[in-house]
Image (cartoon, grey):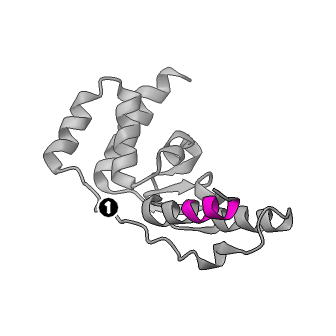
């Protein structure tokens, strides 16, 4: 089996089985193989963009959300879980929240350390506001 045959098989497998949205890594590999003289033809140009299989999202039902909240025994973690849920935060954003990021007067969370370092302002609904007030009054005063 020649190197070209091997690469052709690799392209075929990639096209049929990889769930990536980009064929760029394979194309980069093939471009490097040409530069180094391993192959003569850039078969990467024949590779079609791989279609990503979009899986429908599963959402928790209101009953499941309540079960989740009840299952968490630690009050600080429960507040974090509720904040993630009610504000729609990414886990990393929630873990980086500080008291300075919570503005109860304006009813917003200020996400300054989020994805791509972009600042986001997230409105706080009444349920989350109540949770955050309780957390600040009951949990944080013990740490002062």
Q: Main secondary structure of the magenta part?
A: helix
Name the residue located 86 percent from the left edge and 62 percent from the top edge: 36
Corner quadrant of residue 57: bottom left
* First to last magenta residue range: 3-9
Where's residue 38, x and y in %?
A: 80, 61
Name the residue located 51 percent from the left edge and 65 percent from the top edge: 12
Determine the secondary structure under disc 1.
loop
Q: Residue furthest front?
A: 1
Corner quadrant of residue 112: bottom right
Q: Is residue 19 left or right of residue 69?
A: right
Where's residue 83, x and y in %?
A: 39, 45
* Figure quadrant of the C terminus: top right
Corner quadrant of residue 40: bottom right
Residue 20 shows in this picture: no
Q: Nearer the viewer, residue 44 or 5?
A: 5
Tell me if mark 1 has few (under 14), some (14-19) or many (20+) residues whose alpha carbon lies within 10 angstroms of its own.
Answer: few
Residue that carries the numbered disc 1 in the rendered image: 55
Up-down relation of residue 116 to residue 60 (above or below) = below
Residue 81 on the magenta segment? no
Up-down relation of residue 101 to residue 118 (above or below) = above
Name the residue located 28 percent from the left edge and 62 percent from the top edge: 56
Q: Is residue 68 left or right of residue 135?
A: left
Where's residue 19, x and y in %?
A: 45, 60
Name the residue located 25 percent from the left edge and 54 percent from the top edge: 59
* Figure quadrant of the N terminus: bottom right
């Amino acid at each position: 089996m020649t190197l070209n045959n091997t690469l052709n098989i690799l392209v075929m497998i990639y096209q049929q089985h990889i769930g990536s949205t980009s064929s760029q890594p394979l194309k980069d590999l093939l471009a490097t193989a040409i530069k180094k003289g391993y192959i003569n033809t850039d078969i990467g140009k024949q590779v079609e963009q791989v279609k990503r299989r979009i899986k429908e999202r599963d959402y928790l039902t209101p009953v499941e959300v309540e079960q989740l909240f009840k299952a968490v025994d630690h009050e600080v973690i429960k507040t974090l879980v509720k904040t993630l849920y009610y504000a729609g935060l990414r886990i990393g954003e929630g873990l980086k929240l500080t008291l300075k990021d919570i503005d109860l007067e304006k009813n917003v969370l200020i996400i300054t350390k989020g994805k791509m370092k972009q600042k986001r302002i997230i409105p706080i609904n009444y349920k989350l506001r109540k949770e955050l007030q309780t957390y600040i009054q009951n949990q944080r005063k013990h740490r002062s």
